[in-house]
Structures are given as structure tokens and as C-alpha cells.
Amino acid sequence: MADTPDSVEREIDILEAGLRRLEAEYNMYFAGRLPRPPLETRAQVAAIVRRIDSTHIVNYGLRFRFTTLQTRFAKFANLWDRGLRAKEEGRAGPFVQPRDSAVGTPPPKPEGPKQPDRVLSVATFSDPVRELERVQGLYDTLAQARREAGQEAIPFHKFAEMVKTQVGALKAKGSHEVAFRVAVKDGKVALTARGVSGGARAKK
């Protein structure tokens, strides 16, 4: 196809906005604020994904951005379907939260001595564009930890772009790979990155 980078970027912008809207509508549905699942919005987003997927994207940055959005849509579609099945079967699904995690209710503060850092995940990357599954896994751990700590979620595309930038910067300084660590310190979730000289990989 003869799509220009500008036209592809516009399509990706539309996809990103549509995916944000779809996520919000599913969240409202599972929270009981919408009477029906947003199947029409989902069909529109799926059509945009298919349209962009059939386009030959030459620009590296646009290709990376689309792939991250496509991966996020597929992952959330699976999660939404699981939630719908659980709802139909009367089970507690992935969108059911415990009572004490309701919005506006701060978690109880721990008592006693200060706890040491709790490492939740460590993952190394040499080329995030080719390691999207690992990027997604690290993001899921970070997003879940931030939700539990009452911190605002980071959009996946921004997280993926940050990982790519950090890897590029540290590899330019001589690192073979870059290790990212998700840890909880003093009740706050922190993501840190450091260069790795060898080829060993730390897994989640």
C-alpha cells in the first residue's frame, strides 16, 4: 500500500484513542456503570487494527508504536473475554476487586519496622522491539503493583517507548543488555534500569 508515514501516524493516533475509550468502557461495564459490554466500540478498534496491520509500515518508530498497541489490544481482549465468561457463570473474574481496594479507601499503613525492598520482577532486554512479550510481562507486573499501591497507571505505549529509549541509551554507553527491576520500597513502586555487561538474562 502507498500509505505515507503521516497517514499511518493518523491511523495509529485514532487506534490509540479508540483503545483508551474501549478500556474505559469495559471498566465501566465491569463496574456496573454500563448495561452492556461495548461490543460496537471493540469491533471498531479491531477493524482499525486489521487495517493498519495490512499496511506496510516503513518507519521504525511507527511500527514499534503500532505493535505495542496491537499487543495491548490482544492481551486486553483476552482479559475482557475471561471477565465476561466469569460474569456469565457467576464467578469472581479478573475485574472483581476485594472490598478494601475500593476507590477512595486508602490501604492500611503497615506497622512495625520498615520493610526491606521487595523485588517483584527483573527482566533484561537487548532489543525491546523484538522482545515485546517480555516488555508486556514487565509492564503487567509494574501496572499491577502500582494499582495495589494506589499509584496511577502508566500507559503501555509510554512504558514501551521508555524501555526502548533506556535500552538504546545504556547500550550506547557499552552495556550488552539492560536490566529493569520492579520493586516496592516504603510502599512505593519503583522501576530502575542498569546496564549489564554480560549476556545473562534475569527472568521474571
Image (cartoon, rainbow, N blue to C red):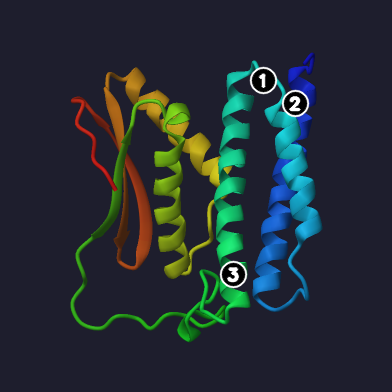
Q: Are marks 1 and 2 in contact (CB under 8 Å)?
A: yes
> Which residue is label 1 attached to?
57
Quadrant hosting residue 183: bottom left
Tell me the element at label 1: loop
Amino acid type of the residue tagged 2 in the rendering: Val
Do the numbered discs 1 and 3 sit on residues whose CB atoms are within 8 Å?
A: no
Quadrant for residue 58, please give it.
top right
Q: Which mark is residue 92?
A: none
Disc 1 or 3, which lies upstream in sequence?
1
Q: Quadrant of the N terminus?
A: top right
- Point out the tag, 3 or 2, that comes first from the N-terminus: 2
Report the disc number at residue 8.
2
Mark 3 and mark 2: Cα distance apart in space: 35 Å
What x and y, as percent, mark residue 137? 41, 47
Q: Which residue is at a point 48% across and 64% down the rendered structure image?
A: 151
In the visual, does 165 lie left or right of 4? Answer: left
Indicate which label's residue lies in the foreground, 3 or 2: 3
The kind of residue tagged 1 is Ile
Per the rendering, the mark at residue 85 is 3
Q: Residue at x 62, y 68 (%)?
A: 84
Give the vertical position of 181 relative to 65 (above or below): below
- Badge 1: few (under 14), some or many (20 or more) residues near its Cα, within 10 Å? many
44 displayed left or right of 86: right
* Dot 1 or dot 2, earlier in sequence: 2
Tag 3: amino acid: Arg
Residue shown at the point (73%, 67%) measured from the top left = 37
Q: Report crowding for label 3: few under 14, some 14 to 19, many 20 or more residues within 10 A (C-alpha).
A: some
Q: Position of residue 19 (x, y in %)?
A: 69, 49
Work out how far the residue at label 1 is from the one at label 2, CA to CA, in angstroms.
Answer: 8 Å
Describe the element under mark 2 as helix, strand or loop.
helix
Query: Which residue is at the front of the view, 175 or 15?
Result: 15
Q: Determine the residue located farthest toward the front in the rendered image.
A: 89
